[in-house]
Every structure is written in C-alpha cells, then in structure tokens.
C-alpha cells in the first residue's frame, strides 16, 4: 500500500512546551540531510511560567478532591481572581474543561470582565470535543491539553494507539502544549483513588527497578525532536495518520503512524524534496528534515 503526504510550510500553532526527555535509547528516528541517514536525538527544555486555573473539571463531582462550579459562578469568582492574579503577574487560564458542551466556556469567555483576564484554555477527556469549536471562536487564546486520558493500567498497544490518536486530535486543533498523565506508577498502575492507570514508567517496588512503557516511546517520538517554540504545520495528501512541526532552527519534524497489521510505503514531499519512507506494521516513526 502506498500513501502520500505533503508537508505545507504554513505554520499554524506555536508549541510553548513539551515533556522533556534526555534518554537516548530505543528511539526509532531518521534524520534526512543531503541524502544521509544518521541517527539524531534532541533534548527539549520546558520554559517555566506561572499560570492559574480556577478549577480542575468544574462540571464533575469526583471521588477525589473536587469542587463544582456553574459558568455564572466562575464569572463571579473571576471578578476577584482576575485582578489579584494580575497584580502578581500570573496569567489566568480557563480550565480544565472536561465536557463536550462548548457553551459552558462560551458563557465565561463572552463575559466582558472574565474575558479581560483569561489568557488561555485547558481541555481534557470529553472536553476535547469542545476544543475545535472554542479554538475557532477564540483563536487568540493559548490552548493546553491538561491531562491525557490515563488508560486502564495495562500499558499495552491499545494504550499506544489511543495516546497517538489523542495527540493528533489536540495538536491538529490549536493546542499549544500537551501533558501526559502519569509519569510513573507502581506495577499494576493502581492510583491512590483505586483506579488502574497507564504511565510512562512502571516501578517494581520489590526489587527497586523500573521500565519504560510503550506510551513512553509515543511521547518520545514527538517530545525528543519537537523543540519549545516549534509550530504545527498543515498537511496535505491522503495520509491522515501524521503530525508535522517546524522547529525554530528550520528543521521539520514529521511523526508518522501505521496502525495496520501490514508494512506501508509512504511518499513524503516537502517543498521540492521527495522521500520514500517504509513504515513497519503497528509502528510510529519520526523523521527530521534539515
């Protein structure tokens, strides 16, 4: 099977931060430079900036510490929170949104007082379905994906595919930063709230060892090569299983997925440059074009 992909140098969304990773093991990556294919791993450094989100998942009464708010209640709270944070030079982000109903956020963002102080939005879980509408309506607001859906503790191929699909959705719909949940858990993935969850690292408490899970490498395929300040690029062609980024140094990073059980050939075009790339079955591949 041959599919085509065109990288269009029309940068859309600047990425402000990514999970840094300095481990250089087991990362499948190709650097395309003057026809040579050396191995390259880059390190990302995340900038620090103070931001305040009024409430995590304000529409949900959870088993863990939570507080529900109506949009009207958050508007009232913003009258006090906004000025105080402004004095402290702290940005206010609306979040985190965990519902698909965009009108919950519109009620706040269309409020004259609240809108004055809100500089960004945070989304997670079902909130991802409200993201395209809200980003289109409020394109000047920064967008954070604030918590990846944390799975079932199996750390298996299904988790890898879901993680990749989530990254494609968020980063293709205006997201500036992407956050994984959890970094590490004991083997079995049982959280303090009795919920088995996935993680980037699992720890064997008995023998004091740890190992990287498959989802660690999903994050690594992007965060290892996409640097802070990079921009998401538009894609053309018939390949829908890809993301592309433009780094500040001019390099282009293309992450390609093949979720089928068969190897695949992809014809990649970037400007006048054309490449033929072989994608293994059930794989992610990262290419850097310089």
Image (cartoon, grey):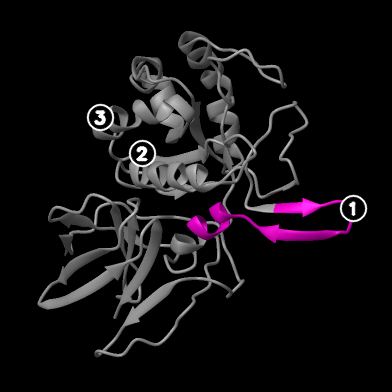
User: Which circle marks residue 100 in the picture?
Assistant: none
Badge 2 marks a residue whose secondary structure is: loop
Q: If you read the primary sequence from the N terminus, does the residue marked by circle 2 or circle 1 appear first?
A: 2
Q: Position of residue 80 (x, y in %)?
A: 58, 21
User: Vertical placement of 5 versus 278: above or below?
Assistant: above
Mark 3 residue crowding within 10 angstroms, few (<14) / some (14–19) / many (20+): few
Q: Which residue is mark 2?
A: 141
Mark 3 vs mark 1, CA separation in Å: 52 Å
Mark 3 vs mark 2, CA separation in Å: 10 Å
Mark 2 residue crowding within 10 angstroms, few (<14) / some (14–19) / many (20+): some
Q: Nearer the viewer, mark 2 or mark 1?
A: 1
Task: Classify residue 116 as left or right of residue 8.
Answer: right
Q: Quadrant of the N terminus?
A: bottom left
Badge 1 marks a residue whose secondary structure is: loop
Q: Position of residue 72 (x, y in %)?
A: 47, 9
Q: Residue at 25% x, 90% y: name it.
A: 34
Q: Which residue is mark 1?
A: 206
Q: Nearer the viewer, mark 3 or mark 1?
A: 1
Q: Which residues are magenta?
A: 202-219
| Image quarter of residue 26 | bottom right
Residue 218 in magenta stretch:
yes
User: Which circle marks residue 137 in the picture?
Assistant: 3
Q: Residue at 36% x, 59% y: name it.
A: 281
Q: If you read the primary sequence from the N terminus, does the residue marked by circle 3 or circle 1 appear first?
A: 3
């Amino acid at each position: 099977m041959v599919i085509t992909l065109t990288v269009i140098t029309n940068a859309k969304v600047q990425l402000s931060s990514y999970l840094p990773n300095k481990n250089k093991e087991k990362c499948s990556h190709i650097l395309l430079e003057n026809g040579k294919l050396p191995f390259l791993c880059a390190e990302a450094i995340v900038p620090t900036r103070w931001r305040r989100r009024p409430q995590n998942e304000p529409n949900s009464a959870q088993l863990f510490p939570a507080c529900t708010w109506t949009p009207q209640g958050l508007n009232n709270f913003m009258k006090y929170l906004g000025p105080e944070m402004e004095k402290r030079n702290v940005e206010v982000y609306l979040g985190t949104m965990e519902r698909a109903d965009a009108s919950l956020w519109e009620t706040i963002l269309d409020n004259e007082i609240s809108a004055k102080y809100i500089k960004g939005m945070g989304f997670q879980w079902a909130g991802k379905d409200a993201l395209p509408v809200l980003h289109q309506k409020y394109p000047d607001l920064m967008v954070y994906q604030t918590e990846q859906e944390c799975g079932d503790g199996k750390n298996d191929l299904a988790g890898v595919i879901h993680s990749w699909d989530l990254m494609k959705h968020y980063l293709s719909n205006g997201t500036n930063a992407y956050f994984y949940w959890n970094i590490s858990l004991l083997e079995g993935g049982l959280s303090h709230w009795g919920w088995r969850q996935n993680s980037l690292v699992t720890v064997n408490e008995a023998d004091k060892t740890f190992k990287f899970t498959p989802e660690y490498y999903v994050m690594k395929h992007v965060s290892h090569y996409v640097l802070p300040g990079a921009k998401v690029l538009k894609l053309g062609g018939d390949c829908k299983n890809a993301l592309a980024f433009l780094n500040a140094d001019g390099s282009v990073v293309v992450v390609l997925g093949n979720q089928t059980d068969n190897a695949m050939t992809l014809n990649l075009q970037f400007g006048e440059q054309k490449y033929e790339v072989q994608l293994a079955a059930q794989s992610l591949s990262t290419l850097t074009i310089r």
